[in-house]
Amino acid sequence: MFTQESRLKYLDIASGIMIVWLLIYHALYPMYEDTISAAIPFLYFFMPYFFYKSGMMFQIKDVKSLFIKDFKKLIVTFIIWSAIGYIMMVLWHLFNDEELTWKILLMRPIRSLILTCSVPMNIALWFLPVLFIVRQLTNWLLKRFKSYFVAICSLIFAIICLVLNSYISPYCLPTWISATAWGMFFFSSAIYLREYEVKKWMIILSISIYVISLFTSIPSVYGAVEPGVLLNSIWYITSLFSCICFNNVCRFIVYFYNRIGQNMNTKFLFPILTYVGRNAMSFYVVHYIIFKIVFDLIWIYKNEYYETYQGLIIVLLCYAIICPLVSVMRNKIKRVIITNNNNDNKNICEKH
C-alpha cells in the first residue's frame, strides 16, 4: 500500500505542515501569548513530533560515527545560527541606542545557554542541542536495552522532572533537562512503534486518543516545562498517539493523491509543503530571528498592529520571503562543500 517513495513524500508533507504550524504558532504569540495552545489546539504535539519523526528514521550506529555526523549537522548549525542571533541582538541594541553592558553582552547569553540551550535572539534553537543529546544517549542505550525499555525509563525521568518543577519550584531544573527527558521518550517510542503505525488497531486507537485529547485540557505544546504533574503526564501519552495519528493522515493523503493522480506527470506532491518539509532546518533556524525583529519593529513604528492580524500578516510575509532565501543559500553552500569534498577525495585516490 505504501511504497518507499510515498513514505518519503508523506514525511516531507508532515514536516512541511509542522514547520508551517510552528511559524504560525510563534507569529500568533503577541495576540494570544500563553493561551495559543487553547486558541489553536489541533497540532498541539508539533514539538514532540519533531523528536518522533527523527526516531522513525533512526538506525543504531557506531557511537563515534553518529557523534561526528550529528555534531556537523546539529551542533555546527546551532553554533552558526546562535552566533547570528547574538550578532543580531547586539545590532538591535545599537539600533535602539541602548547601552551595551556586560550583562547584555555576556551574562544574559551565558545564563540563557545554561538554562535553555539557546541565546536570547534565537531561543527556538534549543531543539538542536537537545536533539543531539537525545540521539547520542538513545544510540548508546539501544546497544544495551530494548527501545520500549528506554522509552519507559525516559517517561519516568520526565515525570520526575515534572514533580521537581511542580513541588519544589517552577523551572528549578534547566528546561533542556526536562526537554531531553521527554524528547527521548518520543524518540525511542518512535523506534519501537514505527512498525506498528499502519496496523488497523493502532490507527483506530491513535485517532480515538487524538480526538479525545482535543476535548481535554492540553497544558502546553512544551508540556514538560510547565508546572503540573497529572496534565503533563497525560500530555506525553496523548501527544505520542497524536503523532501516530498525524503520520497516518499524511500517509493516506499521499496514497489517495497517488490513486487520483497516477496518470498525471507530477514531480512534487503539494509543492509548497513538500519544499518546506525538505528544507525544514532552514526554516526552523531563521524563523525566530525574523519573528523577533519584525514584531519589535512593529511595536516601535506601528504599535496599533502589534496584537492584530495586520501584524500577523506582516510577519508571515517576511517568513515567506526570507525563509526560502535562506534555504536556497544553505543548499548552495552544501553543494559547494560536497563538491569540494568529492574533489579532495578524488585527488587523494589519484595520488594513491
Image (tube, rainbow, N blue to C red):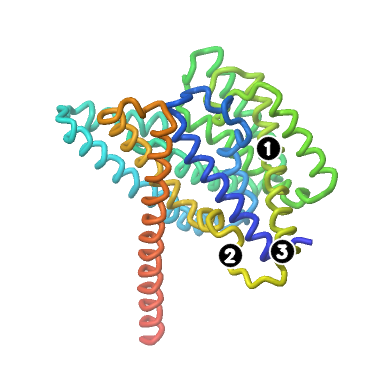
23 lies left or right of 57: left
In terms of depth relative to the viewer, which is nearer, 304 or 69? 304
* Residue 229 spot, x, y in % from top left: 62, 19
- Decide which of tag 3 and tag 2 comes sooner along the chain: 3
* Residue 224 spot, x, y in % from top left: 56, 27
Q: Secondary structure at mark 2?
A: loop
**Separation of disc 3 and disc 2 at Cα?**
11 Å
Which quadrant is home to the C terminus? bottom left
Which residue occupies 61% across, 29% down?
A: 157
Q: Which residue is mark 2?
A: 268
Q: Residues within 10 Å of mark 1 (few under 14, many from 20)?
A: many
**Residue furthest to the right:** 201
Which residue occupies 56% across, 57% down?
A: 274
Tell me which amino acid carries mark 1. Answer: Leu
Q: Which residue is mark 1?
A: 240
**Separation of disc 3 and disc 1 at Cα?**
28 Å
Mark 3–mark 2 contact, CB under 8 Å? no
Which residue occupies 56% across, 24% down?
A: 161
Q: Which residue is mark 3?
A: 258
Mark 3–mark 1 contact, CB under 8 Å? no
